[in-house]
Image (cartoon, grey):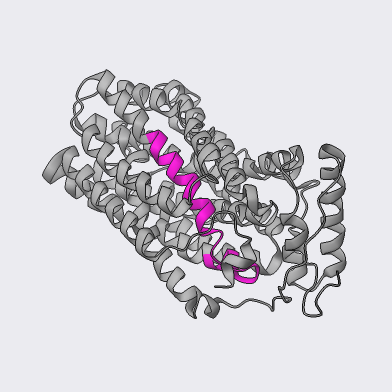
Amino acid sequence: MATPANTRITIADRMNRLPPAPYFQRLVARVSTGGLFEFYELFMAGAVGAALVHAKVMPVSGLAYFVGAGFLGMFFGTSIFGNISDKIGRRNGYVYSLLIYSFFTILMAFSPNAVWIDVFRLLAGFGVGAQLVVIDTYVSEMTPASRRGYYIAFSQFITYWAVPVVAFLAYTLVPTHVLMAGWRWVVLIGALGSVAVWWIRQGLPESPRWYENHGDITQANAVMQQIETTVAKEVGSLPPVRPGTEEHESRGHFREIWVPPYRSRTIMLLIFNLFQTIGFYGFAAWVPTLLVSEGITLIHSLLYTFLIALVNPLGPIIGMVMSDRWQRKWQIVVVSLSIGIAGLVFSQMRTPVGIITMGIVITLLNNWFSTLFHSYQAELYPTRIRATGVGFTYSWSRLSSALVGFIIVALLKSFGVLGVFAFISLAMAIVASVIGIMGPRTNGRSLEDISSV
């Protein structure tokens, strides 16, 4: 049957007809190593911050500045590098941001006082803040629609291994002093991204969707042909390509995220990201300090945090199983409400068994939630403005995190741990509402189909 005149075979058509293959697992695992460093930085804050307070490097109130500095840097890095990635490519944005993070993290490890610690943490955050945005964009564009949620969840599975690693390092190194304070070693280990980045870059293909969008059809076809050849060798013959009706996209501009149909999605994601980070990082970044405030010693706080951290990679496994089986929109609603309820229960725990058990429940829910929304938000914009839209809206989660520390300190002083988790629960209820009311359905649809309506 003849192909209609107004249709053509696009990179999206060729990508979406590919079956699951080991090639995609390897590609996602490789690019996700960059996310390890962002997660290391994020979850390092809780343990290192508690150590800084314990060592009287800074007061408890100063911890809000320490945590906030990193997130403020991520706010600018996420927004700026998201836009840059749409212009210079996913691979280049990925590499440059990781190098910036590594350089300033090394300087932070040798900082003489709290002021310089905060300054270099802010600058390191500028670099590392772009990692998850670029990775989510890259994985979404480099995998077929039928398994997109699975591969984003697999990416999160890789990155979440940073959490038990940093928790273990904090538990073993923070109480020590070998040449320098133990917390400095924990920070310095996180800077090893500069060593890994060149290996990561070698052989990492640029997104063929990005090439196609920028008019470089020759490179787009070359990369896509390489992917098809590799997948065919692994799984056998490939199904035929079904041409779609997508026209070549023009270059994207920031203003596009503010016009229909993307304006409502931008507003939805802004509200979502302002509040989701309160539930997610409000627990992860502050749990050691919250435990110490309840009279638990620093060493026991770090031990409990480490035991809870061990289950972090299991949450994305739940996402790998569930993400493509049920609408991600409704999974986000249910899981976010569950996080709020579990947080209130955690605030009432006083025994080690209760603390660890509920901490594990919250961690599993948080990480399942993370796999869902990282996949979901990367699906809502077209290729030409995908990293721009996701980067801008996701950056507001970093701004929220930079400010929420001050709110948590105030609530902790006035209302204790229960007040903190009541605040977190309210935030997650808002998250559930905005996605439930405004969020489109995405499962099983091509990125081009989702972005066209």
Q: In this rendering, would 18 be left or right of 380?
A: right
Front residue (pair 268, 388): 268
Q: Is-magenta flag for residue 375?
A: yes
Indicate whether 173 appears above or below 289: above
Front residue (pair 290, 383): 383
Residue 34: quadrant of the picture: top right
Residue span colored magenta: 363-389
Image coords of residue 376 (percent x, y): 51, 55
Q: Is residue 404 visible?
A: yes
Front residue (pair 125, 18): 18
Quadrant of the drawing holding the N terminus: bottom right
Q: In this rendering, would 109 be left or right of 350?
A: right
Image coords of residue 89 (percent x, y): 70, 63
Indicate whether 339 appears above or below 168: below
Q: What residue appears at the point 74 percent right and 56 percent down from the top-left corner?
A: 15
Image coords of residue 126 (percent x, y): 52, 56
Quadrant of the drawing holding the C terminus: bottom right
Q: Is-magenta flag for residue 175?
A: no
For the stretch drawn in magenta, the main secondary structure is helix
Report the label total.
0
Q: In this rendering, would 274 be left or right of 452?
A: left
Q: Is residue 111 visible?
A: no
Q: What residue appears at the point 47 percent right and 60 percent down from the top-left corner?
A: 394
Q: What residue appears at the point 75 percent right and 54 percent down from the top-left corner?
A: 17
Indicate whether 118 appears above or below 378: above
Q: What residue appears at the point 51 percent right and 32 percent down from the top-left corner?
A: 313
Image coords of residue 290 (percent x, y): 25, 35
Q: Farthest residue toward the front?
A: 1
